[in-house]
Every structure is written in C-alpha cells, then in structure tokens.
Image (cartoon, rainbow, N blue to C red):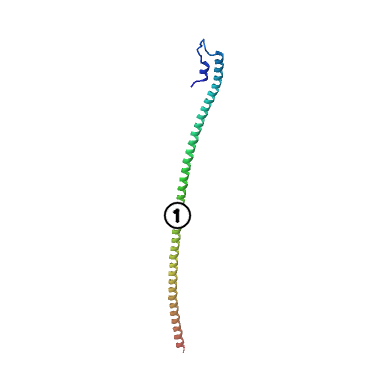
Amino acid sequence: MITPLDIENKKFSKQMMNGYNVEEVDEFLDELTTDYEKAYKQSTELKTRVDELERSLLHYKTIEDTLQNTLVMAQSTAEEVKEVAKQQAEQIIKEAEGNARKAVDDLGQEILMKKKELEDIKKQFEVYKAKMESLLISQLELLKDINKDEE
C-alpha cells in the first residue's frame, strides 16, 4: 500500500515539451497527500479499533462459554441435590414406618404380657378364693364341732 510519505516524495521526470505544469502537479500532490494521509490515519485507527473489538469479542465469548458451562454445572448440581433429597426423604419415611411398626409390635407384645399377667392374677385370685373358702369351711366345721361338744 502506498503511504502518504511515498506520495510526498514522488518525483516526476520533467519533459520539455507537452509536460505538466510543475507547480500544479506539486499542488495537486500536496492536496492528494493531505487527503490520503487523513484516509491512511483513519484506516489505521479503524484497523486498531477492529483489533480491539475482536479481542473484546473473544473475551466476551470466553465469558459466555464459562457462563454456559457454569449454568450446565449448576443445573446438574441442582438435579443431584434434588435426587439426594428425594432419596433422603424416602429413607426417612422408611425409617419412620419401621419405627412405627416396631412400636406397634412392642405395644402388641406388652398387651399380650399384661393379658397374661391378668390371667395369672385371676388364677391366683381363684386359688386364694378356694383356699379361703376351704379355710372358712374348716373353721365352720370347727365351730360346729365346738357347738356339739358344748351341748
């Protein structure tokens, strides 16, 4: 690419006949140099700006990729947490059901033991009652014997 300095330093050979007016050519070249210098600077600035924007774009794409990966990991972690919580809830329910069954079984056993104790006490009462009745009968017999002797 031709630089503004190339235009400024360009020299034309002079011909004697039918040549261009040197002052007009120099004047035109000066104007061309000024305009081309502006365009060249603008082009350089725009290239620099494009490079900066491309670096920024790459930076933001990297951030976007990181955010997408983070989001995927967060979703995966959330699913894992939900699954673990569900399993823990099921385990708690199973333990509660097991504890309830054990409590019911223990109460059933206790009821059976109390019924047996009640039956044993009733039997003891019947034995005691029979002994008392026997004692009373024997005491009554003694009284009868004593009354017969006194008569």
**Where residue 131 sits: x, y (%)?**
43, 77
Vertical relation: 123 (above or below) 15: below
Please, what is the three-letter code of the amino acid marked with disc 1? Glu
Q: Nearer the viewer, residue 52 or 129?
A: 52
Vertical relation: 34 (above or below) 14: below
Q: Residue at x 48, y 42 (%)?
A: 71
Say few, some or many: other residues with alpha carbon within 10 Å of mark 1 (under 14 / 14 to 19 / 20 or more): few
Q: Residue at x 46, y 43 (%)?
A: 72
Vertical relation: 104 (above or below) 6: below
**Where residue 1 sits: x, y (%)?**
48, 22
- In the rendered image, which quarter is residue 109 located in? bottom left
Residue at the far top: name it: 16
Q: Residue at x 52, y 25 (%)?
A: 43
Q: Nearer the viewer, residue 37 or 110?
A: 37
Q: Nearer the viewer, residue 143 or 96?
A: 96
Task: Please give left or right for residue 88 compared with residue 33 in the image.
Answer: left
Q: Residue at x 45, y 59 (%)?
A: 97
Vertical relation: 134 (above or below) 110: below
Residue at the far bottom: name it: 151
Residue placed under numbered mark 1 in the picture: 90
Total count of labels: 1
SS category of the residue bearing label 1 = helix
Q: Nearer the viewer, residue 123 or 6?
A: 6
- In the rendered image, which quarter is residue 124 located in? bottom left
**Where residue 63 sits: x, y (%)?**
49, 37
**Where residue 76 sits: x, y (%)?**
45, 45
